Image (cartoon, rainbow, N blue to C red):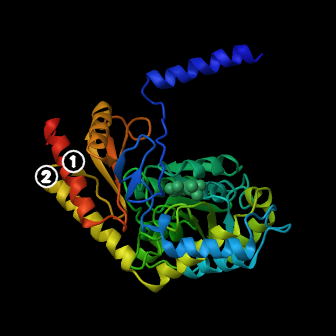
Amino acid sequence: MYEKFQVHLQHQLNEIESAGLFKNERILVSAQGPEIRTSAGQEVLNFCANNYLGFSNNPRLIAAAKAALDSHGYGMSSVRFICGTTNLHKELEKSIADFFGTEDTILYAAAFDANGGVFEPLLTDEDAIISDTLNHASIIDGVRLCKAQRFRYSNADMEDLEDQLQQAAPCRYRLIVTDGVFSMDGNVPPLDKIKALADKYDAMIMVDESHSAGVIGKTGRGTTEQFNLRGQIEIITGTLGKAFGGAIGGFTTGKKEIIGMLRQRSRPYLFSNSIPPAVAAAGIEAFKIMTSSTELLDKLHENRSYFVEQMTRIGYKIKPTQSGICAVMLGDAKLSQEVASRLLNEGIYVIGFYFPVVPKGEARIRVQLSAAHTHDQLKKVVAAFEKVGHDLQIL
Ligand SMILES: *Cc1c(COP(=O)(O)O)cnc(C)c1O
C-alpha cells in the first residue's frame, strides 16, 4: 500500500514546490531576537518574529524560568485535572485575569488549543457563531468542531455583521467572534461598534487577542482597553507565544461560568498535557513587567511609527496599522518574493506573503516591529528597503 501512497504524496509535494508555495525553514543557531544568526552563517536583522516586547530573550523571564526548573522540575507528566496543576499555573491564571480585567482564566498548551476547545463545550446546533472572514485558522477549526450554525461577515465590515446578526436572529444564543489584530494587515476591528451591534441583536462577543494583547491599548491590555470595554466582553483568547514571552501556551479568559464549563468539558484542556512550570513562571514574570511599566509598549509604538513614517517618505505604501504588524504593499506575488530575497542579501530577514494567504494582487512584505529593535536597526531596515526599491525601480 505505501508505495502507491508515496507516489501520491511525492506528486503533491512536487506540485506545491512548482507552484512556488513550498515552505522552507531557515535554521537559527542563536536565541530569538532582533539580531539572529542562521545555520548558513549569516547574521541578519530579524523583522518577522511576534516578539513585540522583546520578551523571547528577556533576562527576567529567563531567570524566572530557571528558578522554576529548580523549584518545580521540568515536566508535569499529567493533564491539569489529574496531577498537572501547580501553584504557578494558578498564579499565572490569576495574573492573566487581572491583566484583562476578567473573572477567571483557563490555560492551554497553545492558543490553537484554546480556540479549538472553546466553542464545542458552550454552543449547540440551536446556536449561532458569527465569525469575521479573516479570523485565525484555529478559530475556523474550532468552529468546525462545534455544531452551532455558522455565519461569516467580511473583515471588520459592520454592515455585513448586522446582516448576519439579523439572519441569526432565530437562533438561541449568538456569539460574534473576531481577532483583536488581523495578522496580515495589522488592523484592529471596531470593537465599540461590534459591541453596539451585539447589544442591539442580543449577542455575546469573543475576541482573540493573540496579536493585540501586550500591544494594543494605553497599557497594552488589548482591544478591550482601547475601546473601554474591560470586563464587558464574554470571552477573550490569547497566546503566551507572542508578546508574552514567545515560548508556548495559550489561554481563555472571561466570565467565570464560561471558564468553569471549559474546565469540565474542553477537550484540549482535558486530554492534553499541562504547560511546564518554567513556562508558567516566566509568564507570571511577563505580566509583572507589563503591569509595572509601559516602557516597552511605548518603545514598540515609537518604533512602529518611525518605520511607517520613513517607509512612506521614501515611497512605499503601508496599510493603516495600530499594531506591531506593518504590511508593505507590493501587489505582485513574484515581486514580493524578489524584494524579500534581496532584503535578505542586505541582511534583513522579512517574509513576503501572497495569494492564497492574502487576496490576489495584494502581495506584501509583512514587517513586524519589536520594542527590542534599536533606532540604528530601524535605520538599517529602511535604508535596505530604499536600496532594493531603487534597484527594482518600484519607488
Ligand atoms: C498566533 C495565533 C494563534 C495561535 O497561537 P499559538 O499559541 O501559537 O497556538 C491563535 N490565534 C491568533 C489570532 C494568532 O495570531
Label 2 to label 1: alpha-carbon separation: 9 Å
Question: Can you give x and y, in whole percent of width and height, for residue 315 in the image?
Answer: 14, 49
Give the crowd class for mark 2: few <14, some 14-19, many >=20 residues within 10 Å: some
Q: Which residue is the extreme one toward the bottom?
A: 292
Residue 362 position (above or below residue 279)? above
Q: Nearest the camera: 97 or 262? A: 97
Residue 227 in sight from this viewpoint: no
Give amino acid for label 1: Phe
Query: Relative to 301, is 195 on the left or the right?
Result: right
Residue type marked 2: Ile
Q: Is residue 52 left or right of residue 248?
A: left
Q: Nearer the viewer, residue 83 or 70?
A: 70
Q: Which mark is residue 352?
A: none
- Identify the residue under disc 1: 385
Q: Is residue 114 visible?
A: yes
Do callouts 2 and 1 mark residues in contact (Cβ within 8 Å)? yes
Q: Residues within 10 Å of mark 1 (few under 14, many from 20)?
A: many
Residue in the picture at 28% in, 40% down: 345
